[in-house]
């Protein structure tokens, strides 16, 4: 039985990804902060175990990987899906906003990847990092987010080169607008009506709509599969053509 460790699994892309893996027959460790929401995700399948807690320090990331091994015995795919988007230009962005954004969006994926590598070597597994199309091109008033997601893409590529000889593949997915609680929260913080905001985001996409979490999860599952055995070091947009 293959095993996936998915962070940010209490909602949005992470939750959809954990469920997609379970429906495909994988065992899943679904990690996140909100235990109640994680339990709702776990209710979908008895193949999903949950891990609720903070991942701000490298020791906590080590603990999550160790607990996954204790639960399932191996790791075949690590999905770094946890992320935050706090808006602000360079003047508006506080030290706290900068540090929190880079910690969650860049530090934690690195710490988890480092901890998981010895186990992924045994399974010749893979890592999928959830970046953003704002990691490929900049967005306004999101300097910390853009820096963290751009850094995550180059972290992906660097790890892919280093791990290729061990049979480990490392890839990044770069979504555009996705109908998630994080996107809705951004609208609320900006004082906008959520439905109007989502409609505005959809207008920017050449195909006229935003993605569902399940569509992104489908790409994650593909990249974790043998069908993607020749894909590593890639940063793949899933944005309705926006990055074109």
Image (tube, rainbow, N blue to C red):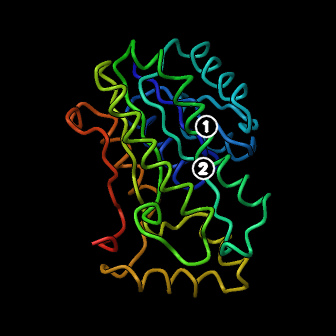
Q: Marks 1 and 2, Cα distance to the nearest angstrom?
A: 24 Å
Q: Nearer the viewer, residue 207 or 151?
A: 151
Other-residue count near label 1 (Cα within 10 Å), few / some / many at <14 / 14–19 / ≥20: many
Quarter of the rendering occupied by the C terminus: bottom left
Q: Earlier in the sequence, mark 1 or mark 2?
A: 1
State the image coordinates of residue 116 (x, y, percent, origin top left).
52, 23
Q: Residue at x 34, y 35 (%)?
A: 224
Q: Residue at x 71, y 58 (%)?
A: 98
Task: Tell me the number on the disc at residue 145.
Answer: none
State the image coordinates of residue 88 (x, y, percent, origin top left).
68, 74
State the image coordinates of residue 126 (x, y, percent, origin top left).
38, 30
Q: Residue at x 43, y 49 (%)?
A: 153
Q: Is residue 49 above or below residue 38?
A: above
Residue at mark 1:
42
Q: Nearer the viewer, residue 86 or 181?
A: 86
* Badge 1 element: helix
State the image coordinates of residue 9 (x, y, percent, origin top left).
59, 44
**Is 189 left or right of 145, judged from the image as shown?**
right
Quarter of the rendering occupied by the N terminus: top left
Q: Residue 69 is drawn in which quadrant? A: top right
**Is 12 left or right of 174, judged from the image as shown?**
right
Residue at mark 2:
105
* Badge 2 element: helix
């Amino acid at each position: 039985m293959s095993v996936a460790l998915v962070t940010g699994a209490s909602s949005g892309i992470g939750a959809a990804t954990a469920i997609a893996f379970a429906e495909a027959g994988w065992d899943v460790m679904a990690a996140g902060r909100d235990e109640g929401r994680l339990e709702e995700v776990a209710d979908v399948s008895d193949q999903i175990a949950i891990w609720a807690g903070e991942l701000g320090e490298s020791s906590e990331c080590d603990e999550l990987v160790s607990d996954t091994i204790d639960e399932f015995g191996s790791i075949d795919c690590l999905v770094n899906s946890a992320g935050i988007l706090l808006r602000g230009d360079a003047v508006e962005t506080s030290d706290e906003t900068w540090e929190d954004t880079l910690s969650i969006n860049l530090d934690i994926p690195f710490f988890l990847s480092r901890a998981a590598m010895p186990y992924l070597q045994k399974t010749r597994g893979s890592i999928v990092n959830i970046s953003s199309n704002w990691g490929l091109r900049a967005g306004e008033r999101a300097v910390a987010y853009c820096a963290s997601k751009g850094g995550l893409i180059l972290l992906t590529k660097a790890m892919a080169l280093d791990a290729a000889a061990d049979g480990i593949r490392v890839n990044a997915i770069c979504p555009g607008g996705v109908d998630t609680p994080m996107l809705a929260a951004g609208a609320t913080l900006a004082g906008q009506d959520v439905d109007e905001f989502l409609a505005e985001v959809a207008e920017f996409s050449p195909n006229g709509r935003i993605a569902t979490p399940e569509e992104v999860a489908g790409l994650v599952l593909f990249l974790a599969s043998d069908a993607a055995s020749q894909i590593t070091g890639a940063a793949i947009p899933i944005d309705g053509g926006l990055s074109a």
